[in-house]
Image: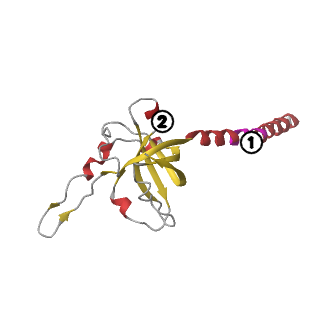
């Protein structure tokens, strides 16, 4: 009986050890399959109070709306993505060159459904400041700011935008409009 239990244990350990590389390779393949490369233009930036602050050890976040060019080639309604650009204090925010809809970019993105949302989620930030009393003034930011070249862009505010994460060095310039 003791020999039988030992044989089972050795067999189970052997199966586990042999299956670990397969599990790791499957996870790696799934992680890579979540990455996507798209061509598009930054048509708007969502400005928040958090985007104005350079916090010390906390990753910084800049949110932009990208219109993908693939959908234009297929004569469909332009497809918009909400892109969270995450960067550390040692790295810089997206440059003015990136925040220009006249310039086309190739983005390497990773899907993150947890931050999907519509532009309506940012409506509360578009109210102008008002005087509460003599000593207090409420200040708010313009939530959605269209980038140069996208002033006439019509971005549906009720559409739920799929969210993607962009890391530094995850974009490359392609050309001008």
The furthest residue to the top: 75
Mark 1 element type: helix
Relative depth, front residue between 75 and 2: 75
Say if mark 2 contacts mark 1, CB within 8 Å.
no
Image quarter in which the C terminus is found: top left
Q: Quadrant of residue 76?
A: top left
Q: Nearer the viewer, mark 2 or mark 1?
A: 2
At a point 50% along the width and 50% down the height, the residue shown is 166
Q: Which contiguous range is marked in magenta?
A: 18-24
Q: Is residue 68 above or below residue 147?
A: above
Q: Secondary structure at mark 2?
A: helix
Asked if residue 21 is among those painted magenta in the image, a careful observer would answer: yes
Q: Position of residue 160 (x, y in %)?
A: 37, 37
| Circle 2 Cα neighbour tier, 10 Å, few/some/many (<14 / 14–19 / ≥20) | some
Q: Would you say 93 lies left or right of 23 here? A: left
Q: Earlier in the sequence, mark 2 or mark 1?
A: 1
Q: Is residue 98 left or right of residue 124?
A: right
Residue density around tag 1, few if under 14, some if 14–19, many if 20 or more, within 10 Å: few
Provide residue 147's location: percent of width, then percent of height. 35, 51
Q: Main secondary structure of the magenta part?
A: helix
Instruction: Identify which residue is drawn at 38% across, 32% down.
Output: 77
The residue that disc 1 covers is: 21
Of residues 8 and 80, the one nearer the viewer is 80
User: Which quadrant of the figure contains the N terminus?
Assistant: top right
Decide which of 82, 105 is in the foreground and name it: 105
User: CA–CA distance between discs 2 and 1?
Assistant: 36 Å
- Against 93, residue 28 (above or below) is above
In the foreground, 86 or 132: 86
Q: Which mark is residue 70?
A: 2
| Residue at (44% x, 59% y) in the render | 95
| Image position, residue 64 (x, y; %) | 40, 50
């Amino acid at each position: 009986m003791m020999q039988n239990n030992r044989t089972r244990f050795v067999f189970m350990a052997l199966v586990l050890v042999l299956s670990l590389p397969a599990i790791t390779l499957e996870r790696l393949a799934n992680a890579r399959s979540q990455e996507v490369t798209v061509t598009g233009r930054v048509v708007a930036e969502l400005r928040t109070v958090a985007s104005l602050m350079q916090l010390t050890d906390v990753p910084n976040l800049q949110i932009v709306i990208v219109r993908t060019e693939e959908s234009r080639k297929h004569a469909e309604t332009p497809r918009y993505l909400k892109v969270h650009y995450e960067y550390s204090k040692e790295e810089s925010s997206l440059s003015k060159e990136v925040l220009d809809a006249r310039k086309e970019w190739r983005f390497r993105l990773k899907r993150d459904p947890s931050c999907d949302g519509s532009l309506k989620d940012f409506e509360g930030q578009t109210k102008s400041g008002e005087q509460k009393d003599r000593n207090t003034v409420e200040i708010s930011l313009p939530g959605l700011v269209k980038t140069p070249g996208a002033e006439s862009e019509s971005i549906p505010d009720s559409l739920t935008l799929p969210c993607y994460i962009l890391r530094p060095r995850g974009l490359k310039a392609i050309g001008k409009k």
